Image (cartoon, coloured by chain):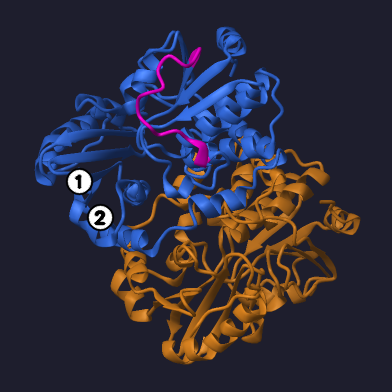
Chain colours: A blue, B orange
Amino acid sequence: MTVPDDIIEALRGARRVFITTHVVPDGDAVGSLLGAKLALANLGKQCVAGLSDPVPPSLRFLPGSSGVWSGGCGMTGQFDLALVLDCGSLDRVGRCVEVVQTCPVSVNIDHHATNTLFAAINWVDTEAAATCEMVAELIRAMGVAYDSDIATCLFTGLSTDTGSFRYSNTRASTFRTAAELADAGARPWEIAQNVYDSRPYSSLAALAEAILGIEFSCNRLIASMAITAADMARHGITEGDTEGFIGYARSIDGVEIAVAFREVGQGTIRVGLRSKECVDVAAVASEFGGGGHTRASGCTIQGTMEEARSKLMPSLERALRKAGCTWTA
Amino acid sequence: MTVPDDIIEALRGARRVFITTHVVPDGDAVGSLLGAKLALANLGKQCVAGLSDPVPPSLRFLPGSSGVWSGGCGMTGQFDLALVLDCGSLDRVGRCVEVVQTCPVSVNIDHHATNTLFAAINWVDTEAAATCEMVAELIRAMGVAYDSDIATCLFTGLSTDTGSFRYSNTRASTFRTAAELADAGARPWEIAQNVYDSRPYSSLAALAEAILGIEFSCNRLIASMAITAADMARHGITEGDTEGFIGYARSIDGVEIAVAFREVGQGTIRVGLRSKECVDVAAVASEFGGGGHTRASGCTIQGTMEEARSKLMPSLERALRKAGCTWTA
């Protein structure tokens, strides 16, 4: 992994940097956002980290998370450079798009295969386990010393985007980066406690209900979960709390595709897709205007839960067949 | 971590080695057993890996697992040395105890703080994340080259005993060992698929029911699950399939102690104990003749589920108070 020279030059030359990432931010988004901000601040840059959505509760332990600006517009014309992290396309920055568009220079650092190369300078490495791994490399290349706060932010993204070192993007180099970040002061256990081991019982109970409601199709090659707005309201949870549910559907013996339908508003179904060994779910998501990785993607479908399911299923069946999976109806 | 010289000498001098580990073996037990067997076989030793219980289904992908001997007695007098791995006490080897006791030399390699130093030569390192980490060090010290089979076995134990690099025993050195094993051919993703991502739906449904049945006490400092023999029979699962359930109780916000009661026979309740930040659950388990680590231990209590709970709860309350936790009844 080599950091492109023009990124280092652009960042060295910038004085005021706006850093942002995607809507409904996960650990890699917030970790890379805050890690990059702290590192650039250590180089004397004036930085603002901006988010379209609030930092999710499980990530509020991250150093600097309380200083994230989430005011939408109103900060245009104040920055020399926009640094967009972990975003496959520009519309994924949500309400921060105006600030990004009015910056004289934009830099896009990401590891999603569906990245649209939307910025003036683009560095997309689909081999990277996490955008945090790329930011770690950038920090090394720019000669910033890791401190424990930076290491904590970057370790968090490395851990969450690899499913705690379990997904297929986990390589020997991922562990070396993790070791380096732990040496620099990241505490794997404390981070895991915050990210994975401090969930409200309500969210665990919602998970249990979602598991018991799993529906199978295509001879159990597809496992799908549905979480309605009413379910979320009853348990007092938000969409963000259901983030990891899909992994349980995916973990079932023999399942190739896991689907999570989440009703995020009247007539709006957010669909998460995961595959295990062979199906390209990024391609399926892009049929519905979404995107992501080959084995983890998402899209939004308008309609009821049942309509979303009816719209999606034929595409999933085609994708299964294309990947060589067979079943008897 | 330095391997004691007398262990290297004893192993170098042995020609026929019996290797065993604890009853109800987990990933670190089977991983260290098979990793050590493969490494010693590479040094020209005749090795038998013996287990009192069968290798659990989720670990049968491990190289060499089909060659594990589980015949109980009948092999006494055939070995120069017994290598006992990941066992806190000799009775934990179950039906293999007779073979171990009739070996002229015994070696005990373990990372449990409650280890009774039962062998002629003992190497107990409570700082090691897993016994597999110690076996990795032993293999290095004996000059055996890792092959991908050995690396796969040892990586598995490292992953399972750290909860996939999330428990407090995860250090920078753990990640360096993981990187080394991945370089040698261990495939983190394939291992995770087998160990974590190939569970039957029945076991996931049993988990979901156990979550929905969680009972809280001491102002939600204690979360306890109960899995009856009837529950297991209904889902067609065994005790081994419920191994990870307790982690969900532990993951709840504010919970300090998680307890899993499992009815493993008429009037026999196996109790798993986990703590999060301060309580010494190894001490609690040892009050009931069990043992383990400070934050993860277990014991067996005779009686009904309710009797086991009544016997255990006062000890847990005392342990909470001793650790400085307060609550109003």
Q: Is residue A63 above or below residue B11?
A: above
Which residue type carries mark 2?
Answer: Met
- Residue under the image location 66 percent in, 68 percent down: B293
Q: Which residues are magenta?
A: A65-81
Location of residue B89 in the rendering, given as x and y in whole percent from the top left corner: 71, 75
**Residue that mark 2 sits on:** A232
Location of residue A201 in the rendering, given as x and y in whole percent from the top left corner: 38, 64
State which chain disc 2 sits on: A
Asked if residue B254 lies left or right of residue A269, the reply is: right
Instruction: Answer yes or no: is residue A280 visible.
Output: no
Q: Nearer the viewer, residue A70 or B161?
A: A70
Q: How many marks?
A: 2
Query: Do the numbered discs 2 and 1 sit on residues whose CB atoms are within 8 Å?
Result: yes
Real-space Cα separation, disc 2 to disc 1, in angstroms: 9 Å
Q: Is residue A218 above or below residue A84?
A: below
State which chain disc 1 sits on: A
**Residue that mark 1 sits on:** A263
- Residue under the image location 49 percent in, 80 percent down: B218
